[in-house]
Image (tube, rainbow, N blue to C red):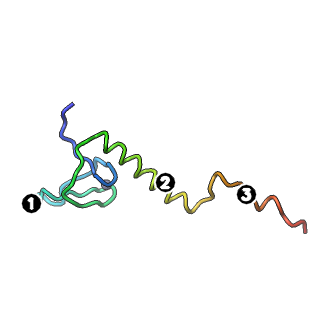
Amino acid sequence: MKKSVKFCPNCGSLNIKWVNPQMWSIWKCWDCGYQGAVVLEDGEMADKIREKFLEKIKNEFADHEDKPGEENKEDEDKPGE
Ligand SMILES: [Zn+2]
């Protein structure tokens, strides 16, 4: 398994390309917007980064919603009109 695959070091995405062909040392990730000269070539590491990244996104979205672990306490002490 010797493929020269490049991964984004920020989110582990494969969707990473040169910013422009004349500056081929600078990469851009179209998934997270990362830009830089550093790219990952380790698929296993990329997998882990990807997992973490997706979890982070999920948590950021979840912030706006009710936490599943917390029951609706409001229901418990409803003031009987
Ligand atoms: Zn990325």
Farthest bottom residue in view: 81
- Reading the image, the residue beneath label 3 is 72
Q: Position of residue 11 (x, y in %)?
A: 34, 52
Residue type, numbered disc 2: Lys
Question: Which circle's residue, 2 or 3, is located before the other in the chain?
Answer: 2
Question: Which circle's residue, 1 or 2, is located before the other in the chain?
Answer: 1
Residue type, numbered disc 3: Asn
Closer to viewer: mark 3 or mark 1: 3
In the shown orientation, is residue 53 left or right of residue 71? Answer: left
The mark found on residue 58 in the picture is 2
Secondary structure of the residue carrying tag 3 is loop
What crowding class fits label 3: few (fewer than 14 Cα within 10 Å), some (14-19), or many (20 or more)? Answer: few
Q: Position of residue 34 (x, y in %)?
A: 28, 60
Secondary structure of the residue carrying tag 2 is helix
Ligand 1: does it lie within 8 Å of the C-beta at label 1? no
Corner quadrant of residue 19: bottom left
What crowding class fits label 1: few (fewer than 14 Cα within 10 Å), some (14-19), or many (20 or more)? Answer: few
In the shown orientation, is residue 46 left or right of residue 23? Answer: right
In the shown orientation, is residue 74 left or right of residue 12? Answer: right
The quarter of the rendering in which ligand 1 is drawn is bottom left
**Quadrant position of the N terminus in the picture:** top left
Residue located at (22% from left, 44% from top): 41
Ligand 1: does it lie within 8 Å of the C-beta at label 2? no
Residue located at (32% from left, 55% from top): 10
- Reading the image, the residue beneath label 1 is 22
Secondary structure of the residue carrying tag 1 is helix
Residue type, numbered disc 1: Gln
Residue located at (9% from left, 60% from top): 22
In the shown orientation, is residue 57 left or right of residue 16? Answer: right
